[in-house]
Image (cartoon, rainbow, N blue to C red):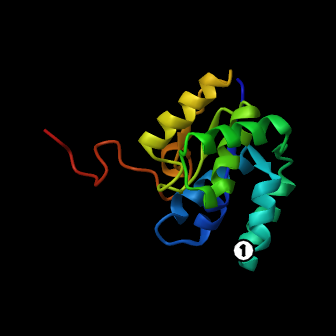
Amino acid sequence: MKVQRVYVDTSVIGGCFDEEFAPWSNGLMEDFRRRIFKPVLSEILAAEILLAPERVRAQHAALLVLEPEFAELTDAAQQLAAAYEVRRILPEKFVNDALHIALATVAEVDMLVSWNFKHIVRFDKIRLFNAVNREQGYKSIEIYSPREVTTSGEGDEDESGEDGSTHS
């Protein structure tokens, strides 16, 4: 069976240390360790991590040990990010968010995972990114939060419903 290639942005790694997001970010990290998914990282992520707290940098280093794939910042990725900018999908100052989407798209990952609900994991933005992707000759990209992707961790929900209750 093909292992799904998952591009992660900085929010996922930082989420390992956020009370609200930790169960699912850590679950995804466990999925990477168990080889359920293949992590895909980038130099944009690495640059952002340099500015992060030590424990986030250490989590990134732990991902590097797992032999991730790297999405390279190519001319094609920069041109695709520029196409997003022309369409004003994101404010200009959030160029790294656009680059994460472009890198993942050009690398043809199976999905991008993020906790950035303002600029990335948002239905209207995803539709706009994918419209540009198709116009530029790329496939649509699947974008999810770690909560929707992980198969591990404390975030596992009861099958009867989110709160454990049964619905009739």
- Which residue was labeled with disc 1? 52
Check disc 1: other Cα within 10 Å, few if <14, some if 14-19, many if 20+.
some
Question: In the figure, is residue 35 to the left or right of 87?
Answer: right
Instruction: Give whichever of 90, 58 is nearer the camera.
Output: 90
Q: Position of residue 120 (x, y in %)?
A: 54, 49
Q: Position of residue 21 (x, y in %)?
A: 51, 63
Instruction: Give whichever of 57, 81 is nearer the camera.
Output: 81
Quadrant in which the N terminus appears: top right
Which of the 4 image quarters holds residue 43?
bottom right
- x 53%, y 45%: residue: 89
Q: Residue furthest left?
A: 168
Regarding mark 1 in the picture, which secondary structure is present there? loop
Q: Position of residue 97 (x, y in %)?
A: 63, 53
For residue 121, above or below residue 115: above
Which of the 4 image quarters holds residue 87?
top right
Quadrant in which the C terminus appears: top left
- x 69%, y 42%: residue: 81
Amino acid type, mark 1: Ala
For residue 51, above or below residue 67: below
Q: Residue furthest bottom?
A: 54
- x 58%, y 52%: residue: 114
- x 60%, y 32%: residue: 141
Q: Position of residue 103 (x, y in %)?
A: 74, 41
